[in-house]
Image (cartoon, rainbow, N blue to C red):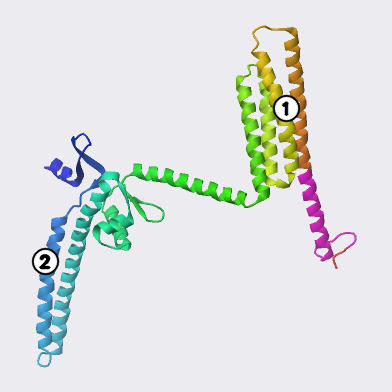
Amino acid sequence: MGKNKKKQELYERQYTTPNKTVVKEVLPAVRKPKGISEYRGKITWGGLLGVFGAWKLLGTLEMIGYASPFSLIKNLVIFGGILGIGIYQFLKGKNFVNRADRYTRYMKLLEHKQYASIEELAGAVAKNAKTVIKDLEFMIEQKWFLEGRFDDRKSQFMLTDKVYENYKQMEQGRLLKEQEEQEKQRIESDPVRRELSQLLSEGNRYVKEIRRLNDEIIGEDISSQLDKIEEIVASIFEIVKRKPEKMPELRKLMQYYLPMTIKVVTSYRDFENERVPSEQLEESKVEIKETLDKVQVAFVALREKLFREDVLDVSTDLDVLEAMMSQEGLIEDEFHPVS
């Protein structure tokens, strides 16, 4: 008996596949409403109590003028209370039964794709969105929807945790795309940012090419050199991102240093793949390694130059700030003592 009762609490659905196969399955995240007969009883007894209380109140009102005040007050309190209880029970039962009915109509939309917009659900039950949201919150509380979730704006309702996780991933993708679009528009509207974006895109292509060549090269020593060069170039890109006015330095890097670096590394890769070794090839490989050492030193020097300019800019700003505070008498120095 207990098993049959539990089975009735589950939401079962049946559908036909494209090849005409009838499939029956249970949605474990959904339970059918329980206690509907009990709440129908509340409608019946609440209605009867309400009618009885109203009838008695009318009779009490007819006694005004010849019954004692005490009897009138006592009857008003008693039968007014009966009327109130009857109305409360009737409305409570009616509200529950109506929601159970709307639950069935909600499920006709939800059982297939397991999510729907609040607008769709409102149309299915001919109610406004506010009523639908209250319905769904009540149904979650009653555990008719064990995994029911709203989106952040309460414009969508999802039946299961899996659907909700899929929604979150899609939402993150949408937000990321929006941010990228906003950034793209910001860059397009700013010529400096647009040029910087183009330079960085080109620079990243060079870095990817260095990384690809590095993967094809066997020698660990030159591979280590290329790793360091890639790291230094990436840090230079980050500095120029923060300080677009340093783009002239980046242009030099792009127009000369990186293309030449790729050219010599490609030659090293080709020499390494030569099946017939020769003394001349080995000398060329050694020369390329020495050149890459110099390239690394040059890139480090460029990065230090950019950092040094930043430090000088900050020092200048600090000197100006200190001079202004001294002139205002806010701090003391040898020329402007605080009075």
Amino acid type, callout 1: Met
The local crowd at label 2, few if under 14, some if 14 to 19, many if 20 or more residues have their Cα within 10 Å, is some
Amino acid type, callout 2: Trp
Span highlighted in magenta in the image: 309-335
Q: State the residue lying farthest toward the bottom.
A: 65
Asked whether 306 or 329 is in front, the reply is 306
Check disc 2 and report its element: helix, strand or loop.
helix
The answer to whether 166 appears left or right of 75 in the picture is right
Q: Is residue 100 above or below residue 164?
A: below
Q: Residue at x 11, y 74 (%)?
A: 51
Q: Is residue 54 above or below residue 131?
A: below
Q: Is residue 224 above or below residue 71?
A: above
Query: Distance from label 1 to label 2 (Cα)?
Result: 93 Å
**Residue picked out by circle 1:** 260
* Image coords of residue 79 (percent x, y): 14, 77
Which labelled disc corresponds to residue 45? Answer: 2
Asked whether 271 or 172 is in front, the reply is 271
Q: Is residue 82 visible?
A: yes
* Image coords of residue 235 (percent x, y): 68, 37
* Image coords of residue 134 (percent x, y): 30, 60
The answer to whether 224 appears left or right of 99 in the picture is right
* Residue 194 within the magenta-colored segment of the rendering: no
Quarter of the figure with residue 253: top right
Quarter of the figure with residue 276: top right
The local crowd at label 1, few if under 14, some if 14 to 19, many if 20 or more residues have their Cα within 10 Å, is some
Instruction: Give the mark, 1 or 2, whose residue is nearer the N terminus.
Output: 2
Q: Nearer the viewer, mark 1 or mark 2?
A: 1
